[in-house]
């Protein structure tokens, strides 16, 4: 009788495998050894589809009984190859962390005594039965009949009552699998004695510890990470860094490699790095490197996060220019005012940037990219939660209200659209993580442009699809007084009233049709984003790429591409130097001016300002300081303020690339 027959207190399989699956299981061997399957199969990993092989059996789901079946197969192999008892084979496998059977056999025959001593077994020791009628238990010191005692291979006889009490106390701990003889020797208590001494309830705890150890020691087994699910996923291939989907019997889906939810197109390592980044000191170091410089006089590190270039050291009181680090007493309106420095510009043009300046620029770009990625990641996560919570309920309620009028396939199409919104939100959420890590190399500019095209299309279409579903669902689905945006532009006659209005049935049909068409487009772009990493190598084959530098791209976007006059809003500093607002704020002010508004609020250099367009004054909403502003008609290329770093580009530095941060004019 095998010691691993299913116990009546252990629940059975969640699902029944087919005959083909059972036949495949007979030839399948679980392995913890990385060298076991190093062939072509181990390298076949797909990130685009669910975790299935050609025969549909790449990922199998097991429960506790299924794990015990795999343990039983392993024990039978070891028992036959090493001529061990089931108890000794189980203890040996547990000691060797359930490694590959061939590897275990090889190690055993090299030094069986050493391996046996480490495992806590004495497999080939001859046992002799004692002729004594009574014995003294070394634990409780009571003298009892020999029929009430049990000994291991060490021949230490302990009464059954002490075995039961002691093992009942140990079984609540994970290390109960390594419980040794109570007479202070190294022999491990076998499974059969646990089964003999414990109640069925306590023995089930022991078997759960054994199953847990078996799963944790295998690289091809994973517990379902979802709450209240004890199922185990079995993979035929070694885990990779790519997303490998598991569809569990609890209806949940997760990644086999990192136990996270669907994180395509990001890899498991990218997800791990992203999740640990919020608690990492890298961001702090990045921020300090991007925004700090040493005082030229006392070397105190000073952080600048906003404001002009005039700095005062809090330690030594030295006044200096943040840009050129020279004494500020030598600066005036002739050197560029508060937000520019001619000395800095001349040094950049003649000598170039220092190593520290280059490192600061790299850190600033990385920090900006992270902030953008984090913001978009959080936004899409919120939209995903909203879609999961509300959108499905709204559409389902709408579908039930229309059951008597429409076919079930129409409702099914709406449910598919809701599922596509959820999937696309997940893809968008992790696409920014993928973009943050994948395109750190500047040589991938062409690939980045294409990826951002796919990502932007998916983002806008997903927003439109989610809006179309939620708007119609919240409104009850049918607008009986006026046609929807889709129906109003559609051709064909309706069965409406004499005024030409379409009936509610026609309205909903047109709405469903527009949802289905848009859902197909969203699915297509979602696939492009997910498959992008796998197809990157072929993007530069047979494609006439037109790589543009930043200045050319900025020029084509209209920043300095014509010589027409345009309005420039500027403010006057204490040195009577006029500094233009950023292009975005100029556009905001000009729009408000054209609408004849008297006041508008803008944000510049991290501060909020109230602009009085009638009296031409700007007021800091925190300090309440006021300055004069003006509106002039100028030509493109005269001067401009960088929206990224607030540097005032003028004079010899005029171009579409900011001299300070090297960002294109936007």
Image (tube, rainbow, N blue to C red):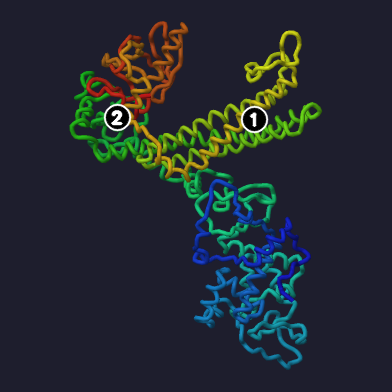
Q: 590 or 450, which lies in front?
A: 450
Q: Which quarter of the rendered picture does the N terminus lie within?
A: bottom right
Label 2 sits on a secondary structure element that is loop
Q: 44 or 482, which lies in front?
A: 44
Up/down of 589 relative to 466, above or below = above
Label 1 sits on a secondary structure element that is helix
Estimate how packed mark 2 is, as few (under 14), some (14 to 19) or many (20 or more) residues with alpha carbons within 10 Å.
many
Q: Residue furthest bottom?
A: 131
| Left or right of 211, for residue 96 | left
Q: 387 or 193, which lies in front?
A: 387
Q: Position of residue 364 (x, y in %)?
A: 36, 36
Could you tell me which residue is drawn at 35 percent across and 11 percent down? 566
The answer for how far apart the CA atoms under marks 1 and 2 are is 49 Å
Which numbered tag is attached to residue 516? 1
Q: 461 or 303, which lies in front?
A: 461
Question: Residue 162 sits in which quadrant?
Answer: bottom right
Estimate how packed mark 1 is, as few (under 14), some (14 to 19) or many (20 or more) residues with alpha carbons within 10 Å.
some
**Residue at label 2?**
660
Q: Position of residue 502 (x, y in %)?
A: 72, 16
Q: Position of residue 305 (x, y in %)?
A: 37, 31
| Left or right of 28, for residue 610 | left
Question: Residue 339 sits in which quadrant?
Answer: top left
Could you tell me which residue is drawn at 68 percent across and 47 percent down? 251
| Whether residue 234 is visible | yes
| Left or right of 311, for residue 286 | right
| Whether residue 223 is visible | no
Which numbered tag is attached to residue 503? none
Q: Residue furthest right?
A: 404
Could you tell me which residue is drawn at 65 percent across and 24 percent down? 471
Up/down of 206 relative to 381, above or below = below
Q: Position of residue 247 (x, y in %)?
A: 64, 49
Up/down of 21 relative to 484, above or below = below
């Amino acid at each position: 009788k095998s010691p691993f027959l299913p116990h009546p207190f252990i629940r059975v399989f969640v699902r029944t495998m087919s005959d083909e699956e059972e036949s495949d299981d007979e030839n399948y061997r679980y392995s913890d050894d990385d060298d076991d399957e190093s062939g072509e199969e181990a390298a076949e990993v797909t990130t685009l589809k669910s975790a299935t092989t050609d025969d549909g059996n790449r990922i199998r789901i097991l429960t506790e009984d299924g794990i015990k079946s795999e343990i039983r197969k392993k024990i039978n192999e070891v028992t036959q190859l090493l001529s061990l008892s089931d108890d000794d084979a189980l203890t040996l496998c547990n000691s060797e962390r359930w490694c590959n059977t061939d590897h275990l056999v090889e190690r055993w025959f090299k030094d069986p005594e050493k391996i046996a001593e480490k495992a806590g077994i004495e497999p080939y020791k001859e046992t002799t039965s004692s002729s004594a009628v009574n014995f003294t238990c070394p634990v409780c010191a009571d003298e009892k009949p020999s029929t009430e005692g049990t000994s291991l291979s060490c021949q230490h006889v302990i009464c059954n009552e002490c075995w039961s009490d002691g093992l009942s106390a140990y079984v609540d701990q994970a290390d109960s699998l390594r419980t040794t003889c109570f007479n202070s020797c190294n022999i491990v208590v076998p499974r059969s004695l646990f089964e003999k001494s414990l109640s069925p309830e306590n023995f089930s705890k022991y078997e759960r510890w054994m199953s847990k150890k078996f799963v944790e020691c295998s690289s091809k087994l994973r517990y379902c990470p979802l709450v209240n699910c004890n199922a185990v996923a079995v993979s035929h291939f070694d885990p990779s860094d790519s997303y490998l989907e598991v569809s569990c019997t609890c209806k949940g889906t997760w990644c086999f490699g990192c136990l996270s939810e669907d994180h395509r197109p990001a890899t498991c390592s990218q997800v791990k790095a992203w999740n640990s980044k919020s608690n990492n000191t890298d961001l702090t170091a990045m921020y300090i490197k991007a925004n700090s410089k040493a005082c030229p006089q006392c070397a105190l590190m000073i952080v600048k996060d906003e404001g002009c270039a005039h700095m005062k050291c809090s330690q030594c009181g030295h006044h200096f220019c943040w840009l050129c680090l020279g004494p500020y007493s030598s600066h005036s309106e002739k050197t560029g005012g508060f937000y520019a420095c001619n000395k800095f510009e001349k040094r950049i043009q003649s000598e170039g940037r220092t190593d520290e300046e280059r490192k600061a620029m790299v850190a600033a770009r990385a920090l900006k990219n992270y902030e953008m990625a984090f913001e978009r990641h959080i936004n899409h996560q919120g939209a995903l939660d909203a879609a999961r919570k509300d959108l499905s309920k709204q559409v389902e309620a709408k579908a039930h209200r229309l059951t008597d009028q429409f076919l079930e396939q129409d409702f099914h199409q709406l449910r598919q659209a809701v599922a596509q919104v959820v999937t696309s939100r997940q893809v968008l959420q992790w696409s920014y993580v993928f973009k943050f890590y994948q395109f750190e190399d500047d040589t991938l500019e062409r690939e980045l442009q294409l990826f951002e095209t796919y990502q932007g299309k998916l983002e806008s279409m997903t927003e439109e699809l989610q809006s179309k579903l939620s708007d119609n669902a919240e409104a009850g689905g049918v607008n009986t007084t006026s046609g929807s945006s889709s129906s109003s532009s559609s051709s064909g006659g309706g069965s409406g009233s004499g005024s030409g209005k379409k009936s509610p049935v026609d309205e909903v049909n047109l709405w469903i049709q527009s949802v289905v068409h848009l859902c197909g487009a969203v699915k297509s772009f979602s696939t492009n984003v997910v498959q992008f990493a796998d197809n990157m190598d072929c993007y530069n084959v047979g494609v006439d790429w037109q790589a543009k530098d930043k200045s050319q791209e900025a020029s084509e976007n209209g920043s300095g591409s014509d010589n027409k006059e345009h309005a420039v809003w500027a403010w006057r500093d204490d040195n009577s130097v006029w500094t233009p607002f950023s292009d975005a704020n100029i556009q905001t002010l000009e729009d408000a001016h054209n609408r004849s508004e008297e006041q508008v609020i803008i944000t510049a250099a991290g501060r909020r300002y109230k602009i009085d367009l009638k009296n031409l004054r700007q007021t800091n909403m925190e300090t309440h300081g006021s300055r004069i502003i003006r509106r002039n008609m100028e030509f493109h290329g005269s001067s401009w303020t960088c929206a990224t770093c607030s540097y005032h580009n003028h004079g010899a530095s005029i171009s579409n690339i900011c001299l300070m941060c090297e960002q294109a004019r936007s």
